[in-house]
Amino acid sequence: MRTPVSIRALSVLVYCCLGLFAALGCYLATLGGRDVWLGLQSRKWPQAPGMVIPSPRETEPEAPAAGTIAVRYAVRGRVYITSQMRFGAQPALAGRDEFELWRWRYPPGRAVTVFYASDTPELAVVRPGAGPEAFWLPGLGLGLLLAAAMFAAAFRAAAAGIGISIGVALFSGIFLCIGCAMLAAGGWTLYRAYDSQSWPVAKGEFAPMAHGGEPGSVPGQRSVYRYVVDGQTHFGNRIRFGAGPDAGGERLRSGVGAGTGTLDVRYSLADPDLAVLEPGIFPGAFWMPGAGLALSLFGLAGIRYATAALRIGPY
C-alpha cells in the first residue's frame, strides 16, 4: 500500500512530465502558428528583385541532395540572403524528390521576386502564402497539448475515484482532431484530382538527369518533368493525386514511364506549378480521407460513450 508521501511524489512526477509535453506542444503550436501568420501576411509585403545563388552544397559534388536554395536580394541599398522559399515548407527537409523539384524550379542564376517584411527586410520569402503543409506543425502542437490535458484529466479522475470517463473523452478527442485533419487534407486531394480532368493540357518532357544521377529517389526512373505555359517553363513531379512522385513504382498509362517521349501535362490555371500527368481520381487518393473518416467516427464514438458514462455517474 502506498503512503501519502509516495502518492504525492508520483503526482508531482506525472504532472512534471505532462508539463513538459504541454510546453513542447505550446512551442510547436506557436512556431507553426507564426509560419501560418507570416505566410498569410506575406501576400501584402513589398517586393524586391532577387536572384538564386549557388548554395555551398551545390558547389560540392559529394554533398547530399538535401542542401539549401539561397536567394540574394537588395532592399534600400543593403544586400540580404534568404533560403525561405515558402513559410511552413522547407524543401531541404521534404525529401530528395521534393527538393529536386525545387532545385529545378529555382536553379542558380534565375531571377525571382522576393516578398519581404517592410520593418524587417531580412525576413523574406520567395513564394508568399501559407500552403497546406504549414498547418501540420501547429496541428501537432495542439495535439500534444490535447494529449497532455487528456492524461492529466485521466490521472486526476482516477485519483478522485470518478472513473476514466473524462480521460476517454479527451483521448477520443485526439482521434477526432487527427481524423478531421486527414479528412480535410484527403478531401482536398480528391477535389483536385476530380478538377484536374478539366485542366488545360501543355506538352512536356522529363527533365534531364542532374549531376549524373536521376532526379527521383528510384534508380532508373525520372520523376521531374518540365512544361511551358505562356512562355514560362514550369516543373512538376506529380504523376497522380494521392500518389508519390514514383507512383508506387507504377508506369504511366501513356507508355513513357522509362523517361522518354512527349508528355501531356495537365496544369491548373490558378497555379501553373500545380500539375499532374494522369488526371482523375485513382484508388490511392482514397486512403487518407478514408482513414480520416474512420478516426473521426472512432473519436465520436468514444466521446459519446464517455458522455453517457458521466451521466450515469461514478463507477
Image (tube, rainbow, N blue to C red):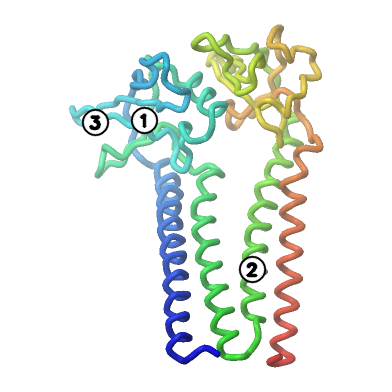
In the rendered image, which quarter contains the N terminus?
bottom right
In the rendered image, which quarter contains the C terminus?
bottom right
Image vertical order of residue 175 relative to residue 80, above or below: below
Residue placed at 38% from the left, 27% from the top? 113
CA neighbours of label 3 inside 10 A, class few (<14), some (14 to 19), many (20+): some
Image vertical order of residue 208 relative to residue 88, above or below: above
The disc, 2 or 3, on the residue closer to the chain's N-terminal end is 3
Which label sits on residue 173?
A: 2
Circle 2: element type: helix
Q: Nearer the viewer, mark 2 or mark 3?
A: 2
Circle 1: element type: strand
Image vertical order of residue 138 relative to residue 92, above or below: below
The disc, 2 or 1, on the residue closer to the chain's N-terminal end is 1
Q: Residue furthest left?
A: 77
Are discs 1 and 3 less than 8 Å apart at CB? no
Per the image, the residue denoted by label 1 is: 114
The disc, 1 or 3, on the residue closer to the chain's N-terminal end is 3
Quarter residue 308 falls in: bottom right
Residue placed at 29% from the left, 29% from the top? 81
Are discs 2 and 3 less than 8 Å apart at CB? no
Mark 2–mark 3 distance (CA, rounded to whole Å):
47 Å
Name the amino acid, label 1: Val
Residue placed at 56% from the left, 73% from the top? 151
Residue 159 x, y percent position in the rendering = 56, 87
CA neighbours of label 2 inside 10 A, class few (<14), some (14 to 19), many (20+): many
Mark 2–mark 1 distance (CA, rounded to whole Å):
41 Å
Quarter residue 181 falls in: bottom right
Per the image, the residue denoted by label 3 is: 75
Q: Nearer the viewer, mark 2 or mark 1?
A: 2
